[in-house]
């Protein structure tokens, strides 16, 4: 089976859209970074490097230093699909990030977004 197109897409091409979505709703790019670091275990320096290098989504999540075990608490619908029901691991990680950015843009408190 062929890989989904998003797997080979650069995270750096999509990331500005996450930030724009958050900023349109009065949130910040720093909060998007915080969410991404929480999810993946990247430090800010490592995250910046991944974006600078144009790393694709598949590599970005496969190389993540420490995927947060609490990410399994992320539930709900994104793009018409329940994130907890997605069977492909990389697609599920991508959708977890999408869902967290959605929650941020909807005004949810960071404490709740980060499942603390």
Image (cartoon, helix red, strand yellow):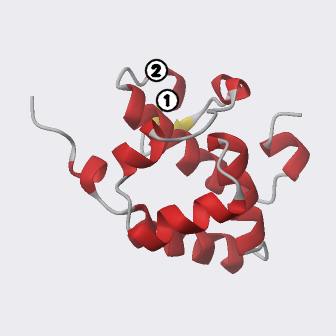
Q: Nearer the viewer, residue 18 or 52?
A: 52
State the image coordinates of residue 19 (x, y, percent, origin top left).
61, 73
Residue at the spot x=67%, y=70% of the render? 22
State the image coordinates of residue 65 (x, y, percent, origin top left).
60, 38
Q: Which residue is mark 1?
A: 82
Under circle 2, the secondary element is: helix
Query: Which quadrant is home to the C terminus?
Result: top right
Residue 66 tag number: none
**Image-based side of 74 in relation to 98, left or right:** right
State the image coordinates of residue 90 (x, y, percent, origin top left).
39, 34
**Image-based side of 107 in relation to 101, left or right:** right
Residue at the spot x=90%, y=45% of the render? 111
Residue 111 in view: yes
Residue 105 in view: no
Counting every numbered tag in the picture gives 2
Under circle 1, the secondary element is: strand
Residue at the spot x=57%, y=47% of the render? 97
Label 2 packing within 10 angstroms: few (<14), some (14-19), many (20+):
few
Q: Is residue 85 above or below residue 68?
A: above
Query: Which quadrant is home to the N terminus?
Result: top left
Residue at the spot x=54%, y=50% of the render? 98
Image quadrant assignment for residue 115: top right
Labelled pair 2, 1 in contact (Cβ < 8 Å): yes
Image quadrant assignment for residue 89: top left
Q: CA distance from mark 2 to mark 1?
A: 5 Å
Q: Which residue is mark 2?
A: 85
| View extreme (left): residue | 1
**Image-based side of 54 in relation to 42, left or right:** left
Label 1 packing within 10 angstroms: few (<14), some (14-19), many (20+):
some
State the image coordinates of residue 31 (x, y, percent, origin top left).
77, 64
């Amino acid at each position: 089976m062929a890989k989904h197109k998003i797997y080979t897409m650069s995270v750096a091409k999509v990331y500005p859209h996450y930030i724009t979505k958050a900023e349109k709703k009065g949130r910040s790019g720093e909060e998007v970074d915080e969410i991404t670091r929480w999810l993946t275990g990247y430090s800010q320096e490592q995250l910046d490097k991944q974006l600078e290098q144009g790393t694709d989504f598949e590599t970005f999540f496969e190389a993540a230093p420490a995927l947060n075990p609490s990410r399994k608490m992320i539930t709900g619908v994104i793009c018409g699909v329940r994130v907890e029901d997605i069977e492909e691991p990389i697609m599920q990680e991508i959708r977890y990030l999408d869902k967290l950015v959605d929650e941020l843009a909807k005004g949810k408190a960071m404490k709740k977004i980060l499942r603390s």
